[in-house]
Amino acid sequence: MERNSRAIAHLDLDAFFVSVEVLKNEKFRGKPLIVGGGERGVVAACSYEARTFGIHSAMPMRLARRLCPQAIVIGGDYEDYGKYSRIVTEILTEGAPLVEKSSIDEFYLDLTGMDRFLKSDLFVKELSQKVKRETGLPLTYALAGNKLLSKVGANEVKPNGQLMIPFGTEKAYLAPLDVKKMPGIGPKTTKELHDMGVETIRLLSQIPVRMLVNKYGKSGFTLSERAQGIDETPVVPYHEQKSISTEQTFSEDTISMSFLLRNIVEMVDKIGYELRSQNKLTGTVSIKLRYANFDTVSKQTRITYTSQDHILLDTAKKLFEKLYDRRLLVRLLGVRFTDLIPGNFQLNMFDGTAEKAALYQAIDSIKGQFGISSLVRGSSL
């Protein structure tokens, strides 16, 4: 790694949910293990032993059970996953100069300029060993000149692998890999490229940028740059967001339960979408109430980490019914989500179904394209 080049490490906790469960129960070690929902649910995570049977995350649980009837199936524990993620985050942020937490189990470190004090590869190796010593969790990392290469490299050497991609070899490293290995290329684009005969990143890098832009718009330019091993995306320092909230002061004080409940539905819809857009899960829901005489009260409850509206809404309604016990005119109402952790629908698979996951993704896609008010619950009308 040259002195003047960037030094970016991607750290990935191997099979994170499974690894946490193995720490809690050694009898799971070396066994095909599936973490996920019930019979109609989907696979949230699985051990490498289970993957040899063709099982993968988001697969319907019924199919996973057919592929590997001897697999051990457990429900998963959000609380423990959040706890271990926070411990690893603390170790990394205390040890590294710049840390980005990209998900509950993935991190980027910017170690640029550290070679004058300590070799970057030695530093990240020692830091990963510290994570292993203090948490027991296996970890894979790759060190490269940018985020793209470090992520691709880490994916290639899982599980429990270490890799350094020297500065200047980025394009050569990517060249033989299948285009599907490139972050940002999903199943649809992979199929399109394969149908065109473009199966490797080497072939993708040889396509004129104008052709890619004509076919894929602005993302075609990014695709061309990445195929050359170019990525200037910065490592964004990790700052833990404390809460996501919204509140409404009414033009007229009200005592109408139906009106107040409709507003709760609207608020949960709004910040639930915001939660998912930021790839966050919440572990605490709070309701705030201000009466016409300006007395302000609030109530909160801890829940299993989630970003699913139906769970959040049910919790918020129950809190409101317990809180609103004076039957006085209400001036203001608010909903707040706290105890946030990085995570996406993968965690929600523990208590959801494949159909429900697809529904939420479709709803969020429509809201993202046409605005948050483009879809509303009938109960809020």
Image: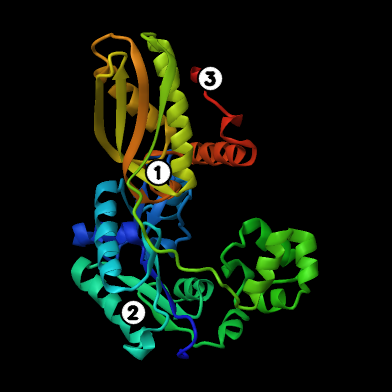
State the residue at coordinates (32%, 88%): 118
Spatial CA span between label 1 and label 3: 24 Å
User: Quick one: label 2, few (<14), some, or many (20+) residues within 10 Å?
Assistant: many
Label 2: which secondary element: helix
The residue under label 2 is: 124
Which badge, 1 or 2, is on the more N-terminal residue?
2
User: Quick one: label 1, few (<14), some, or many (20+) residues within 10 Å?
Assistant: many
The residue under label 3 is: 378
- Badge 1 amino acid: Asn
Please say if the residues under marks 3 and 2 sit with CB atoms less than 8 Å apart: no
State the residue at coordinates (27%, 81%): 126
User: Quick one: label 3, few (<14), some, or many (20+) residues within 10 Å?
Assistant: few
Quadrant of residue 98 within the rendered picture? bottom left
Q: Is residue 361 left or right of residue 307?
A: right
Which badge, 1 or 3, is on the more N-terminal residue?
1
The residue under label 1 is: 348
Q: Position of residue 231 (x, y in %)?
A: 57, 73
Q: Which mark is residue 5?
A: none
Label 3: which secondary element: helix
Q: Is residue 127 left or right of residue 173?
A: left
Quadrant of residue 271 within the rendered picture? top left
- Badge 2 amino acid: Val
- Badge 3 amino acid: Gly
Depicted 56 relative to depicted 134: above or below? above
Depicted 233 relative to depicted 171: above or below? above
